Image (cartoon, rainbow, N blue to C red):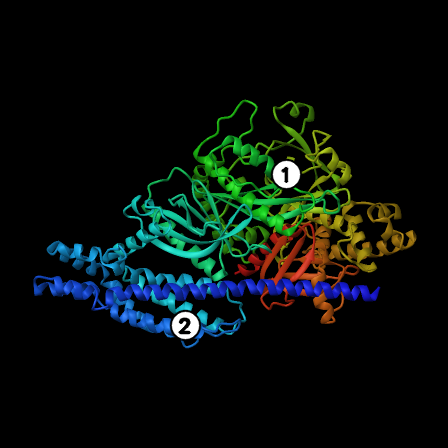
């Protein structure tokens, strides 16, 4: 058996080694191909310069055929310093050619290659326009010269101007060659540093040279591209069209990556690539206008350095070769788009941006688990999220194709249960779903659909408000009022010595006022139901239950696209809660697993809540069988906790808040959020009985506590110990009693002062499974307890990793130490700036997106605390 294991292990190692070598060989072949391409094109270029520079050819022909010696002044103006350029390029070619003659995997070819002499191009390019003018004047005066040159063998049927433009065209090509060379050279190659240095030098040369290039030279470049891609319209469609930026990247189309050159013009995007079969150059063209958007996108495991360009007809998805190249491309393209916007008069259509910002797994404990794609949609700073399954996305794609048959919708990854949960498949679907929704919203905004009486609109299918495209107009007045109120609020805050939760959160959300939530500008039609039979008769109304503290239940009338934020707002108003931004809805399943409902989640898309007293499920019968679906319940709870010094400012000012929070703490004590010793447990039960005005009887205590806790101590002892603490509390309260505050109020306040300083009080605590890579990393370092299941506690100050049994702190992570956070459907990765552990803090959890968002919130809050 051991022998078989060794054989299997050796075969596995051999296979990995083979794949690694195969990849390395492919990269090496590409590297050699690029070097050969550089040398081949360089030699042809030098020969073309020779046509201009050789005195026995063009220059001599022109000089001999000039009837007037005074016309010789044109010769110098036409040919300029082409001899110097040829000399520098010959030197460059010889240096590279000699070292590439016996190339091998580790050959160092580009050391001591000096291209500083290429600065001779500056003079040539600055005077290129004058050169063409001189040639034009000369041919006007001596038209016979054109005939003399026309049939010369060395001209190859080209005109003199075609040779004169070659130095102007050649210099930018070195930047592209070197990007390809870097792509094909492994990072630890002994020549990599030399290659990077030369890339920097070529970019410097081009940047300096571009400063001297005028429109005429740029138009020559446009003409060259029209020839290269065999499309005259690239040059002729618009006489003012100029090349503004070019780079190499990969374009993602139907889940595959295609290596391309892309060019950004003043009015167009050109994507050039080589056809795999014919090896001919091909090009795709896309319009560029004031409605074009460039989007920076999140990295995934399999797709990194993502960005996309969105125009009125299509979405072009790119992956850059590095983060630096991505940032540079986004910066340059943004400049061009902003320039177009400044010149444009179009104001009627508001740009829409769509991003898949995360995924989460639902029913992780079931064989029928599935992934939810979280899509953020923004129109003129107004943001909301939609939550969509892949199966729903497939249905929508078919509808979109029917509504817009001329739309350029790509098919998305095929549906197969075997690979549904593959990370790569999920990431491909993220990109495809984002692209699909982006395209359909752009089309729908420009071309309203023609609906039959039974059809749902595209906005409704996407759970967006029917007035979605009009929201920016509504926001103009609201924005003015919000700014006025915020300024008034800040004036009050600045006069306060101590700030509360409301002050901190309002300041935080206002600091992020680049984004506006729909709920802040649009009134809700959600109401609390007081007369169930009467309200049920209202058209389209549906009633759900939301559980408050102490099992109180409110019935809420909602509609098809009612979002969680609307219900939170209505409940807070019903309860007379002065401030509610730290309260959320929570969904609890039959296993008592809870997750926080995002403000933008549509309530009727939650699978198993009771609607109008009837079990509501958007999952099919087979799924109900596999998930053993029981009804889920919605709770209204405080979710965001800050430092106690902020919490008590609002508690002191709002009696309703105080009552609700202390009852929530009593609930959490019962549900064992806090790990309390017996003395503290006796103390908090004493507070509970005083506040609830219950007698000290073991029956009342047993009703409150879970049986596994109550049964650990004799009933009589519970009564004795709790009475002792009640006596102590009453004694302290008598000393604190004033005319303004009652004994009950003081008791509530004292309880909160005690409980708030338990470490778990201001934490959001989640149970996670430690990823095997993290276990292995800490096993090597002999760090105990980082294995199996642990708790993660998120507070305003820091992240705490807690042991599963006694919730002792294993490790603390400060927010300023965090570099980035990645969430996958069932995995969370936290990376620190110190890069310890090397592969990040990896955990298995179905609440990855929820945890990521809360960490980002606390991180931003801590960074902006000042």
**Dot 2 crowding, Cα within 10 Å, few <14, some 14–19, many 20+:** some
The image quadrant of residue 628 is top right
Q: Can residue 652 be seen by looking at this rendering? A: no
Give the percent coordinates (x, y) of residue 53.
24, 67
617 over 853 or under it: above or below? above
Residue 203 lies, in percent from the top left, at 38, 65
**Residue 494's spot in the image, x, y percent?**
49, 56
Discs 1, 2 touching: Cβ within 8 Å: no
Which mark identifies residue 325? none
Q: Nearer the viewer, mark 1 or mark 2?
A: 2
**Mark 1 or 2, nearer chain start:** 2
* Residue 674 shown left or right of residue 49 in the figure: right
Q: Secondary structure at mark 2?
A: helix
| Residue shown at 47% from the left, 58% from the top | 326
| Nearer to us in this view, 778 or 797 | 778
Q: Secondary structure at mark 1?
A: helix
Q: Residue at x 73, y 52 (%)?
A: 747
Q: Tally the numbered discs.
A: 2
Residue underneath mark 2: 96
Residue at mark 1: 391
Mark 1 Cα shell of 10 Å, populated few (<14), some (14-19), many (≥20): few
**Residue 301 at x, y percent in the picture:** 60, 56
59 sits to left or right of 24: left
- Could you tell me which residue is drawn at 46 percent across and 30 percent down? 448
The picture quadrant where one finds residue 313 is top left
Residue 486 seen in render? yes
Cα separation, mark 1 vs mark 2, equals: 56 Å
Viewer-proximal residue among 512 and 57? 57
The front one of 375 and 23 is 23
């Amino acid at each position: 058996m051991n022998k078989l294991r060794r054989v299997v292990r050796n075969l596995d190692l051999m296979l990995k080694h083979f794949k690694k070598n195969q990849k390395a060989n492919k990269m090496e072949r590409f590297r050699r191909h690029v070097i050969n391409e550089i040398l081949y094109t360089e030699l042809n270029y030098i020969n073309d310069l020779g046509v201009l520079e050789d005195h026995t050819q063009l220059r001599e022909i022109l000089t001999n055929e000039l009837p007037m010696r005074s016309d010789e002044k044109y010769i110098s103006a036409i040919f300029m310093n082409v001899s110097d350029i040829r000399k520098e390029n010959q030197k460059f070619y010889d240096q590279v050619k000699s070292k590439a003659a016996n190339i091998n995997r580790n050959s160092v070819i580009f050391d001591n290659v000096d291209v500083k002499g290429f600065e001779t191009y500056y003079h040539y390019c600055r005077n290129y326009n004058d050169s063409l003018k001189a040639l034009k004047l000369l041919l006007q005066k001596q038209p016979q010269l054109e005939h003399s040159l026309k049939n010369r063998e060395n001209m190859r049927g080209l005109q003199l101007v075609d040779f004169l433009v070659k130095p102007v065209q050649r210099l930018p090509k070195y930047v592209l060659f070197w990007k390809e060379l870097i792509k094909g050279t492994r990072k630890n190659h002994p020549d990599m540093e030399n290659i990077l240095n030369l890339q920097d030098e070529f970019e410097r040369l081009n940047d300096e040279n571009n400063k001297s290039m005028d429109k005429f030279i740029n138009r020559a470049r446009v003409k060259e591209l029209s020839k290269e891609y065999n499309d005259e319209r690239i040059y002729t469609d618009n006489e003012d069209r100029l090349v503004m930026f070019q780079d190499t990247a990969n374009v993602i189309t139907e889940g595959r990556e295609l290596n391309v050159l892309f060019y950004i013009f003043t009015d167009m995007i050109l994507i050039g690539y080589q056809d795999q079969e014919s090896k001919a150059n091909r090009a795709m063209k896309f319009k560029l206008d004031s409605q074009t958007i460039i989007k920076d996108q999140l990295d995934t495991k399999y797709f990194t350095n993502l960005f996309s360009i969105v125009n009125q007809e299509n979405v072009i998805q790119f992956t850059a070769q590095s983060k630096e190249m991505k940032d540079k491309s986004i910066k340059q393209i943004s400049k061009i788009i902003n320039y177009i916007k400044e010149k444009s008069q179009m104001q009627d259509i508001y740009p829409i941006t769509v991003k898949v910002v995360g995924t989460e797994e639902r029913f992780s404990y079931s064989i029928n688990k599935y992934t939810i794609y979280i899509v953020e949609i923004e129109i003129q700073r107004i943001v909301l999220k939609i939550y969509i399954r892949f199966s729903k996305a497939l249905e929508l794609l078919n509808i979109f194709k029917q509504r817009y048959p001329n739309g350029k919708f790509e098919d998305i990854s095929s549906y197969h249960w075997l690979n549904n949960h593959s990370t790569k498949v999920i990431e491909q679907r993220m990109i495809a779903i984002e692209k699909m929704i982006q395209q359909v919203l752009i089309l729908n905004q420009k071309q309203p659909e023609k609906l039959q009486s039974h059809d749902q609109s595209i906005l409704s299918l996407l759970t967006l408000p029917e007035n979605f495209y009009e929201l920016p107009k509504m926001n103009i007045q609201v924005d003015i009022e919000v700014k006025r109120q915020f300024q008034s609020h800040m004036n009050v805050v600045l006069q306060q010595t101590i700030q509360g939760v409301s002050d901190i959160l309002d300041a935080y959300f206002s600091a992020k006022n680049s984004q506006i939530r729909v709920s802040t500008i649009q009134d809700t039609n959600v109401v609390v139901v007081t007369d169930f039979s009467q309200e049920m008769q209202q058209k389209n109304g549906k009633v759900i239950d939301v559980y408050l503290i102490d099992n109180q239940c409110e019935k809420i009338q909602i509609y098809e696209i009612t979002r969680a934020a609307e219900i939170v707002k209505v409940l807070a108003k019903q309860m007379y809660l002065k401030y509610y931004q730290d309260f959320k809805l929570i969904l609890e399943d039959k296993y008592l697993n809870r997750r926080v409902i995002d403000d933008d989640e549509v309530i009727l898309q939650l699978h198993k809540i009771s609607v109008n007293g009837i079990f509501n499920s958007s999952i099919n019968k087979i799924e109900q069988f596999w998930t053993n679906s029981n009804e889920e319940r919605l709770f209204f709870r405080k979710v965001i906790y800050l430092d106690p010094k902020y919490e008590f400012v609002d508690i002191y000012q709002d009696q309703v808040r105080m009552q609700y929070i202390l009852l929530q703490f009593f609930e959490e004590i019962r549900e064992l959020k806090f790990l309390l010793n017996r003395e503290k447990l006796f103390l908090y039960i004493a507070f509970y009985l005083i506040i609830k005005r219950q007698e000290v009887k073991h029956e009342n205590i047993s009703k409150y506590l879970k049986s596994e806790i109550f049964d650990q101590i004799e009933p009589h002892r519970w009564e004795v110990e709790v009475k002792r603490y009640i006596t102590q509390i009453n004694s302290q309260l008598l000393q604190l009693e004033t005319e303004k505050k009652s004994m009950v109020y003081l008791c509530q306040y004292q309880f909160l002062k005690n409980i708030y300083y338990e470490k778990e009080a201001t934490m959001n605590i989640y149970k996670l499974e430690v990823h095997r890579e993290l276990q292995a990393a800490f096993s090597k370092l002999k760090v105990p307890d980082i294995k199996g299941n642990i708790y993660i506690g998120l507070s305003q100050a820091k992240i705490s990793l807690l042991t599963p049994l006694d919730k002792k702190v294993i490790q603390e992570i400060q927010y300023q130490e965090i570099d980035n956070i990645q969430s996958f459907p069932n995995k969370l990765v936290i990376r620190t700036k110190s890069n310890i552990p090397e592969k990040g803090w990896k955990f298995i959890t179905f609440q990855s997106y929820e945890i990521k968002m809360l960490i980002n919130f606390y991180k931003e809050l801590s960074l902006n605390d000042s």
